Amino acid sequence: MPQNSVKLTLVIPCYNEELSLKACVEKCLELKNSGIDPEIIIVDDCSKDNSLAVASKLEQEHSEIRLLKHEINKGKGAALRTGFAEAKGDFIGIQDADLEYNPLQYTELLQPILENKADMVFGSRYLRPSSHRVLYFWHTSMNKALTIASNMCTNLDITDMETCYKLFRRETLLSILPMLKENRFGIEPEITARIAQSGARVYECAIDYQPRSYEEGKKIGWKDGVRALYCILHYSANTAPLPMQLLLYFFIGLVSLIANVAVFAALHSFDLPMIYELNTDVIIAYIVSTLINYLLCIAILFRHKARWSSTGEFIIYLIGVIVMGFADYGLMWAFSSMGLQPVLSKTLAAGLGFILNFALRRNIVFKEKAKAVAK
């Protein structure tokens, strides 16, 4: 058990949870029986029911509770950032107001940190088999798929990235707090990415989980899953292991190629004028695919404005495209002059061009500033 005087802050984001909030807080207060000094910060995210009134009464009744509120609904991520900024505890954790998670299990999550083995602990719903309520197959599958995608980018080997239960040393959380931007459920992969980039020691601890149905008030949906995938790529792909970056760049190149062909096919039926004896539809298709490639690079794989201003970055990118165009032509000519068949020459030139393109973008056009990654 944790020793006396352990100061633990639990941040509770709350939106329309009047039915479960009181029971959740009372359960959190039971941590005092385990030698923990709890601080409970409820962040009401502009609830439409009586959650704010329930929270206000709880604050009046218990000195351990502090109530913060948003004047407009901003989302779970925004509520967590508000609570994190006000937390006073030596250790800071997250507690949903719906009681799907048992707050008393924070006594177990604290152990690796108190033993100085960890700086941050995930409470995993999938780490060990246990009896639990059976609900949605696709929801669970989506969680596990997102965890795998996150692991591929962060190089962490965790089993439950989307878990609510994340426990931090105060200094560990404060080191990444200024970087957190997500307002909704995208905060989960964003936190995981920043923790991985910080070099913090990460542990997992098995927890029990009692899920509720959508009829009972569950809020996360498939759109949040799509956003979570975007957040995984946007916040962690730029520091992902090299094989993962190459895979993502292959995807970007494939999408750009499809766009090139699609635009060309769409324009080819029109009788467009020639430009210096060049087909206009070829030029337009190439420009569109180049722009799509650039936008995907800065949205997914490389952090935007990592080194250059947006204007300078794009100019350097275009110069790189031109250089690689000449390199592709030169490589194909060189292989052909060696007696190789045209198709094989083009294949080899395209393969080398892909590698050179990736190296150019990674090391010159979108090169990371030293301060861009948390240390």
Image (cartoon, rainbow, N blue to C red):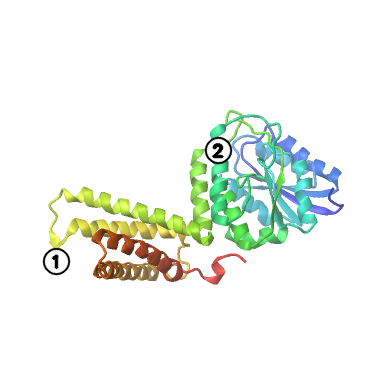
Residue 195 location, quadrant: bottom right
Q: Which mark is residue 206?
A: none
Whether residue 230 is visible? yes
Please name the residue shown 85% across and 45% down the image.
34
Badge count: 2
Q: Which residue is mark 1?
A: 276
SS at mark 1? loop
Between 24 and 252, the one nearer to me in the picture: 252
Picture quadrant of residue 290: bottom left
Mark 2 falls on what kind of element? helix
Distance from label 1 to label 2 (Cα)? Answer: 54 Å
User: Mark 2 or mark 1, which is nearer the start of the sequence?
Assistant: 2
Check the image and name the residue furthest to the front.
339
Q: Is residue 272 left or right of residue 289?
A: left
Say which residue label 2 marks.
Answer: 141
User: Residue 76: horizontal and vertical position, in percent?
Assistant: 59, 46
Q: Quadrant of the C terminus?
A: bottom right
